[in-house]
Amino acid sequence: MENKCSGYVSLGRMGIGHCHNKPKVERNGKWYCGVHDPEKPLTKSQIASNERYRKRGLMYERRELEKSACANLTNEQLKDMADKVSSP
């Protein structure tokens, strides 16, 4: 067993360096601490964050598709479409 984790940590302005936590598990021939274990189960908050990021990405993707679909339309065509949508 190695004496340090194979994960990396931020050193601020100094860049990144190796984690100095005691390793607990071996994954693919490398040792990791509990913080950097690549197969560690996600917490509920991490799952919720991932879902928010996924939804936000879909929103931005849809917005870009809408922009590209409307890029070649004139102002009159856009007004007509808006009137059709807002009218019952």
Image (cartoon, grey):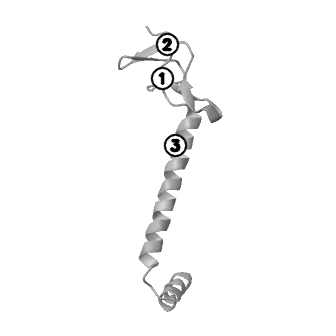
Which residue in the structure is indicated by mark 2?
24
Mark 3: few/some/many CA within 10 Å (<14, 14-19, 20+): few
Q: What's the residue at 47%, 57% (across, down)? A: 58
Residue 83 lies, with reference to residue 9, above or below; the image says below
Nearer-N-terminus badge (3/1): 1
User: Disc 3 marks which amino acid?
Assistant: Asn
Q: Residue furthest left?
A: 28
Give the left or right position of residue 28, taking residue 48 as reference: left
- Tell me the distance, in whole angstroms, between the alpha carbons under discs 1 and 2: 9 Å
Residue 48 lies, with reference to residue 14, above or below; the image says below
Q: Which label is found at residue 25?
A: none
Q: Nearer the viewer, residue 19 or 35?
A: 19
Can you give x and y, in whole percent of width and height, for residue 82 in the image? 53, 83
Q: What's the residue at 35%, 20% (across, down)? A: 28
Can you give x and y, in whole percent of width and height, for residue 11 in the image? 62, 29
- Tell me the distance, in whole angstroms, between the alpha carbons under discs 2 and 3: 26 Å
User: Disc 1 marks which amino acid?
Assistant: Asp
Mark 2: few/some/many CA within 10 Å (<14, 14-19, 20+): some
Determine the secondary structure under disc 2. Answer: loop
Mark 1: few/some/many CA within 10 Å (<14, 14-19, 20+): some
Can you give x and y, in whole percent of width and height, for residue 65 in the image? 43, 68
Q: Is disc 3 in contact with disc 1, using a CB cutoff of under 8 Å? A: no
Which residue in the structure is indicated by mark 1?
37
Q: Which label is found at residue 50?
A: 3
* Quarter the C terminus occupies: bottom right
User: Disc 2 marks which amino acid?
Assistant: Lys
Q: Is disc 1 in contact with disc 2, using a CB cutoff of under 8 Å? A: yes
Give the image quarter of residue 13: top right
Determine the secondary structure under disc 1. Answer: loop
